[in-house]
Amino acid sequence: MQLRYSFRIHPAVGQRKSLDCAFGCARVVWNDALRIRRDAHDAGLPFPKTADLSKSLITQAKKTPERAWLSGAPVGVLQQALRDQDRAWRNFFDSIKGKRPGPKIEEPRFKSKRDRRQAARYTRSDRWSITGTGQLRLPKVGDVKVTWSRQLPSGPSSVTVIKDPAGRYFASFVVETDPADNLTTMPETTAEIGVDLGLTHYAILSTGQKIKNPRWLRRAEKKIKRAQRELSRKRKGSRNQDKARIKVARAHAHAANARRDWQHKLSTEIMRENQAVTVETLGVLGLARGRNAKSVHDAAWGRFVTMLEYKAARYGRALTKVARDFPSTQICSHCRYRPGKLPLHVRTWTCTACGTIHDRDHNAAKNLHDEGRLMRAARIPGDVPAPTG
C-alpha cells in the first residue's frame, strides 16, 4: 500500500525564491487549463485533453514573451499540475454520477497566490534525489536541508514540496510499503472494542474507559486572539501586516500540530490493543452547523476516523463503521429494550424493562461494539478489509 511521509525542510533564501517560482508557474498552468476547459464546456465543445493542453500551455507558451518565465520551473512540475487537474475533474465527475463513495466533491477551482497552501510536485522525470548527506536535491533549486524524523521504508516515487500559511516548508514523499512487513509491528490480539466519539470526552470505549477531550483550539484561543488583534491594527498591504499574519498562522499551526500528534498516538494505541474496532459514521458537516460548531471542528472526528481506517488496513485490523442512523444511545445494551429518544442533557438513564442504570456514552459504545460484531459476522459491507500477505 502507498503511504505518505512528510518532513520539514529548510531552504535558504535563494532556494525559497526558486520554490516560490515553481509554485507560481504550476499555479498559472493550472488556472490556464481550468479556464480553457470551462470555456469549452460552456461552448459545448469536447473536453480538452491533457496532452493537447501540455503542448499549448507549456511547450508553446514558453516561446512567447508573456509566458517565457515558465522556464523558471521544471517542466515535470508543470505537467504534473495538468495531471493533478485531470484527476480532480475525474473525481468530480465520478462524484456527481455516484461512482465515488462519500460526500460530493466540488468542481476544481482557480488557485491564488494568497491561498493557504502552495505546493509543487516533483516526479522521477524531474530527476530529484536524496543525496548521500541526507539533503533533498531538487531541479533548479539545489540541495535543501531536511529534518529527518524517521527513515523511509522504501524509495519514494514522488515528492511534493509544500509551503503552509506559517511560511514553513515541507517535503511529502509517496512510498510503497509491503503489508506483510507492517503486520509484524503489531502484537497478536483477539480483543474487540466499540468507540463512541463525543465533545465532553473525546472517546468513550465499550470497556468503560473515557478519554478526555484535550480541546486544543480552546487552550490556544487566548494566544490566537492576541495575535489576531495585533493583525487587525496593521496597515493593509504592509510588511508588518504580513509578519502579523504569519504570527496568527503559527499559533493556529501549533494547535493543529498538537491535535494531529495526539490523534496519531490515540489511534495507534487503539489499533495496537484491538483486532476489531467499531465506530459510528458521523455527519460532521451537519454537526458543524450547530451551536457547537467550534468544538466540533476542534475535535476533528473525521480525521481521527480516517487515521483508524488506514491504520486498520496497514496493520491487519478490522474497522467497522456503523450507519449514523443506528440508535446507539436509545437501546439498552443489557436487554435491547428501546425506550425512545433521550434529550441531550440526559447523561444517565434507567432502563424501564430490566432496571439497568446506564451511562449514556458508555451504553452507546457497548451498542456500537455489539452492532459491529453482528456486521462482521454477517459480512455486511462497511468493514475495512485487512491486507492479505
Image (cartoon, rainbow, N blue to C red):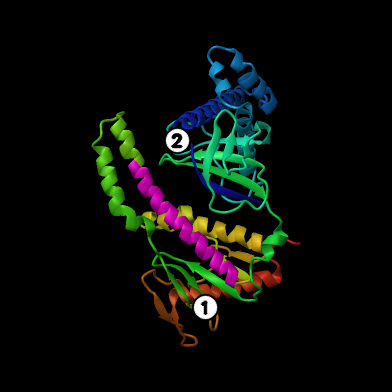
From the image, which quarter does the C terminus lie in? bottom right
Write down the quadrant of residue 296 in the picture: bottom left
Q: Amino acid at mark 1?
A: Thr
Which residue type does callout 2 highlight? Asp
Q: Which residues are magenta?
A: 247-273
> Where residue 229 sits in the image (x, y, percent)?
25, 43
Q: CA distance from mark 2 to mark 1?
A: 44 Å
**Residue 8 against residue 111 in the figure, above or below:** below
Residue drawn at the location 57% of the way across and 61% of the way down: 308
Asked whether residue 381 is in view, the answer is: no
Name of the residue lying farthest toward the right: 389
Q: Secondary structure at mark 2?
A: loop
Q: Which residue is mark 1?
A: 207
Marks 2,1: beta carbons within 8 A: no
Question: Label 2 neighbourhood size at 10 Å, few (<14), some (14-19), many (20+)?
Answer: few
User: Going from the N terminus, do you reach mark 2 or mark 1 first?
Assistant: 2
Total marks shown come to 2
| Furthest residue in direction top, as rendered | 65
In this rendering, position of residue 232 left or right of residue 388: left
Q: Position of residue 101 (x, y in %)?
A: 62, 50
Q: What residue is shown with label 2? A: 115
Please check the rendered image and state whether residue 386 is part of the magenta-colored stretch, yes or no.
Answer: no
Magenta stretch holds residue 260: yes
Pick the front one: 234 or 20: 20
Question: What x and y, as percent, mark residue 43?
Answer: 60, 22
Viewer-nearest residue: 313 or 241: 241
* Residue 69 % position (x, y): 53, 19
Majority secondary structure in the magenta region: helix
- For this rendering, which residue is in front, 20 or 284? 20
Q: Is residue 134 visible?
A: yes
* Farthest residue, direction left: 233
Residue closest to the eye, 349 or 129: 129
